[in-house]
Amino acid sequence: MKRIAEALPSVIPVSRYDGGSYYIGRWDGGKQFWGQVVASYSKKHDSNNSRLHAARRVVNLGGRIVRNIAHIFDSSGNHFTGTERTMIGTTADGESKVLDEATAKMESFIAKLGNVRYENIAIKLFQ
């Protein structure tokens, strides 16, 4: 039986759509980017690791944490400069307020790349 990684194509196409891959495209000679605004719960855990306990802790912490995550790839799809992560705030600060701020910061990050084209990309597996 083949291992999963051996069965996958070497380059994976990613289609741009209004959602998780809205902030994807190319710039500067074919370099590629994929940015996302994400909301997650704290990674901090204590001895009780149940979902119910985690949900109670989130309420106590003030909501979900909103972050911007941007991956940069070379023109061949290699994840070559790492991942940029920026914490924006928590939904306790006002969900629409913090999401608006995250969106503005993501668009500012992408604008700094230069002349970008929002379009489908093709990337290689990375961790």
Image: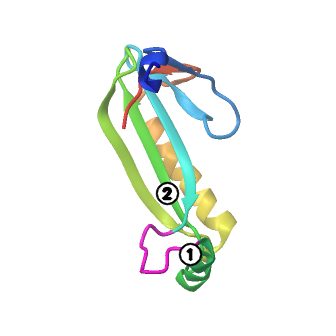
Q: Which mark is residue 73?
A: none
Is residue 115 in view?
no
Name the foreground residue: 120 vs 12: 12
What residue is disc 2 on?
67
Label 1, label 2: how far apart the Cα atoms are: 19 Å
Residue found 38% across the figure and 16% down from its top: 75
What residue is disc 1 on?
54
Residue found 39% across the figure and 51% down from its top: 85
Quadrant (top left, top right, bottom left, bottom right) of the C terminus: top left
N-terminal of the pair, mark 1 or mark 2, is 1
Find residue 18 and report its image quarter: top right
Give the amino acid at mark 1.
Ala
* Residue, far front: 1
Q: Main secondary structure of the magenta part?
A: loop
- The answer to if 49 sits in the magenta stretch is yes
Residue 6, given in percent of the width and then of the height, sits at 42, 18
